[in-house]
Image: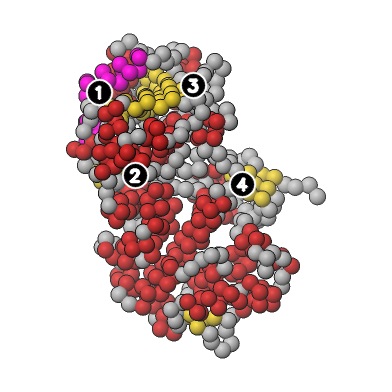
Amino acid sequence: MRSKCCFCFSLQFGKENYLNEKFFSPTYFDYVIIDEFHHAVANLYMNIIEYFKPRFLLGLTATPERMDGRSIYALCDYNVPYEIGLKDAINKGYLVPFRYFGIYDDTVDYSTIRIVNGRYVSAELEDKLLVERRYDLIYAHYKKHNSIRAMGFCSTRKHAEEMAKQFNKRGTASVAVYSNGDGEYSEDRQAAMEKLEKGVINVVFSVDMFNEGVDICSIDMVMFLRQTESPVVFLQQLGRGLRKSEGKEYLTVLDFIGNYALCGKVPFLLSGQKYDKEVALTGLVEHKLEYPQGCFVNFDLKIIDLFREMATRELGIEDRIVLEYERVKGLTGQDKLSRMEFFTNMDGDVYTLCMNNPKVNPFSDFLGFLDKRGELDEEEKMLVNGIGREFLNTLETTSMTKSYKMPILLAFYNDGSIKMDLTEDDVYKNYKRFYDKGTRWVDLARDKRTRDFKEWDKDRYIKGALRNPIFYLIKSGNGFFAEKEGYLISLNSQLEELAKLQAFAKHMKDIIDYRTADYFRKRYDKNS
């Protein structure tokens, strides 16, 4: 039988009025391929992913982190068949090498700019960036290198407009590109690309319009004219100039570095290595790190000193976690985050800090973390000072060498209407539901005892796969799980009144989602 493959359709296809049996059944397509998969957390993409149940789903992306920082790996349970980083892509010849110049920029004192929700206040930052001395510094270094087609990444619309004005004033044809552009130097994105390609202009100053999805292969220079606020955005912007083009040997990168919070991460981003405070403190980052083949990296001596200074000023672990929480709140526009929202949007280095420091890890007692921040609603306050919090803590910290406990917890959750007692049918149904999603079945296939799971009936599931997780939930569940005649497993009756609270169900589901995603992330990191 010929397979039906859906690989090219309008995003409008994701609207609910098209996702029904009248048009296509959930199992109609055998294969679904989604390009630009980093947009998959958007609603229309999510509708498509959640509706269709293909035999095979493939997502393709050059940027596995969204512009807002949210990881898409959690959507596919960290099932990544192929991944290539910046360093390997250059080493394999897929991208051109870069010649990077870290230029000391003392025209801006970032320590005088307020930080709100983990970001510099835009208006204050703008005022500091728009100074004559900085224009001169940037233009002098631009002229020092022979660029034909350059792109400068700016912080705000006004910043991009002013940079285009200053370059034109100094004799270099330039335009500004930003959403709904209406300034004197603004240009439509497509028109700007064509003019740059034809040599009508030499520089495009952009605000978030060329971070992804745009290819001007002949760009020979990128200029970072704003602070490094996100590792994801930094790498996306660098990638705009790394595409191969006839006659192009390398990309020149001009990075104007000041005393902003994340400046010390730059050399590690270029090398593809994780940030290491001890290496930053040595003042030998240029020599300790290994950059891609054919790449040249040079930092002004004052920047090396700056890296050391910023490393010594680094916040304590708990303060860094709180600052990251505030940053993600600002990023998502939420007044309060769930575990999953924090987990999928947080910086990888901060996540590692959480995992390595259990005493301050918010995911071990998220209700307590929210309580310290004064973010609990009335129902959550009923949970935080009693047995409800203890139960949620048990779910947050229960050991997970496999994912087998999660389907049982989902059965208790029961789509938001908590069940106190589970029958064999309850557990079997949720077990099937959990492992039928994506490639979660791999956990079963890898285990010698369960690798023949596709041939099992309900009785075999109950006697085989479910015996151990149920046993360990009862044994190590702090008395919250119990045996009860006529049922496979039950919740302690002390939880019965709390289980009627909406907040109880909400936090229970959030923990299940987070623990599942965290489990697959750790499995992915281990395999990588």
Amino acid type assigned to the residue bearing label 3 in the image: Tyr
Left or right placement of residue 138 versus residue 13 in this view: left
**Farthest-out residue, bottom:** 485
Residue where numbered disc 1 is placed: 134
The kind of residue on which mark 4 rests is Pro
Q: Position of residue 500 (x, y in %)?
A: 41, 77
Q: Earlier in the sequence, mark 2 or mark 1?
A: 1
Q: What is the residue that sits farthest to the right in this orientation?
A: 1
Where are the magenta residues, as a range?
123-144
Q: Look at 54% across and 81% down and name the residue there.
A: 489
Mark 4 or 3 closer to N-term?
4
Mark 2 vs mark 1, CA separation in Å: 29 Å
Give the label on residue 250, or none: 3
Give the secondary structure at mark 4: loop
What residue would you read off at disc 2?
Answer: 277
Q: Foreground mark, 2 or 3?
A: 2
Q: CA distance from mark 4 to mark 2?
A: 31 Å
In this orientation, which residue lies closer to the viewer: 112 or 172?
Answer: 112
Q: Which mark is residue 81?
A: 4
Mark 2 vs 3, N-terminal side: 3
Main secondary structure found in the magenta portion: helix
In this rendered view, identify the residue nearer to me: 315 or 458.
315
Q: Residue at x 29, y 62 (%)?
A: 375
Tell me if label 1 and label 4 are in contact, CB under 8 Å. no
Quarter of the image for residue 177 reads: top left
Q: Secondary structure at mark 2?
A: helix
The alpha-carbon separation of the residues under discs 1 and 4 comes to 45 Å
C-alpha distance separating marks 2 and 3: 30 Å
